[in-house]
Image (spheres, helix red, strand yellow):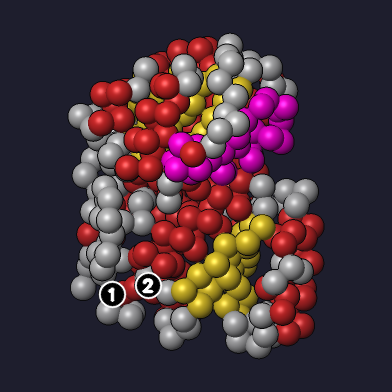
Amino acid sequence: MKYKMYDEILEQPKSIKDTLKEEKSHMKEIAQKFEEFEKIYLLGCGSSLSTCYSAKSALDFISDRNIDVYTGYEFFYNKEIENKNAGALLASQSGETADTVAALRAAHEKDIYTVSITNEGQCTMIKEADDTVVTRGGTEKAILGTKTYMTQLMSLYEILFSMNGYEETIKKEILKNIENLPSNTKNLIRKTEAENRELAIKFKDDQIFYCMGSGPNYGLAYKLAMTMFMEGALKHACPLYSGEFRHGLIERAEKDIPVVFLNADYPGDEMTRRSIEFCEKLQTKSLIYNMRDYSDMNPLMSPFALVIPLEWFIYYLAHFNCEDPGATRHIGKVRY
């Protein structure tokens, strides 16, 4: 049986291409606006929060800009938000996520300039934000987010890396990688399905997965655990920074426990490699996804490369457990 998520995985290259075609010049204009701000907030929930984590972490490698990431209600209830010369990029698949809409309205009350990034052109966040980016993912049924995740993350990278003040060589390389994302994504979709289908067969009976990454890959580890394993495959999962392995997971790691490692040779991935070595001695069931096995893009683009094989793994993990990876029991695209 083929579920709707299958088609949505295949539609990602077109969604990225269409978003770039329609919104690229506009995102450049937004980047110029955000260059003026001393403080930038990235706000989202679920998969959208994970894109914020990854974008901030990527920028932290080349910039000292003052950027904070918040979930919607964390921002809404925070009494210490800096609002002088500040801007906020708010991400939401539906544009109706109650938490993020509340954050948008709180930002307006504090006179913070707002830009909504969403997949729905007539949603509340589009209507109420100071400016908008509409991703061209089309209707998406799978709750864990494929097309919307990729286009949303791409939009954040395009805006943030288009600002001035960074090391020019890296900036140009990242923007060129973004331009080539449609073709690179198409190749990854084609090349990684079969091997991850086989992996899913091996892991179909496991019930808990630990997901580890550093830098921009922590955002992907968060998405993998929170929205892919738990929402898509209905498996227990926990995301961890690689450097936090020895504070908790080290006491739970044991023979045949699945641990997913995301590695891109970031500075923090020294701890990823040490954790892999430790787990190998314990004979855990390690799934190691190395950026360099999948792409020659700049390592800061790792989430774009690694999410594709992970999508296939989750899709087939759900399939072999007779679950629709796009369906949910208690939540929906807008609000539970």
The residues tagged by marks 1 and 2 sit, at their Cα atoms, a distance apart of: 8 Å
Circle count: 2
Q: Which amino acid does label 1 sit on?
A: Glu
Residue drawn at x 20%, y 29% is: 122
Label 2 residue SS: loop
Which residue is nearer to you in this view: 6 or 188? Answer: 6
How packed is label 1: few (under 14 Cα within 10 Å), some, or many (20 or more)? some
Return the x and y of residue 245 as percentages of the image width and height: 72, 67
**Which residue lies at the image location 42% right of the left edge and 34% below the top edge?**
103
Query: Does 225 appear above or below 320?
Result: above
In the image, is 224 to the left or to the right of 148?
right
Please tell me whether residue 167 is drawn above or below residue 182 in the rendered image: above
Residue 57 on the magenta segment: yes
Q: Specify the quadrant that holds the N terminus.
A: bottom left
Contact between labelled residues 2 and 1, with CB atoms less than 8 Å apart: yes
Q: Mark 2 points at which residue?
A: 234
Q: Is residue 21 visible?
A: no
* Depth check, front residue: 322 or 10: 322
Pick the quarter of the image with the C terminus: bottom left
The residue wearing badge 1 is 323
Observer-side mark, 1 or 2, equals 2
Q: Does the magenta stretch include residue 68?
A: yes
Start and end of the magenta stretch? 53-76
Residue 314 spot, x, y in % from top left: 41, 67
**Residue 232 higher or lower than 215, as above or below:** below
Image height of 299 relative to 4, above or below: above
Q: At 33% across and 80% down in the image, what residue appears? A: 321
Q: Position of residue 194 (x, y in %)?
A: 42, 69
- Where on the picture, by quarter, is residue 67? top right
Identify the residue shown where x is 45% and y is 13%.
Answer: 29
Q: Which amino acid does label 2 sit on?
A: Leu
Q: Which secondary structure lies at badge 1?
A: loop
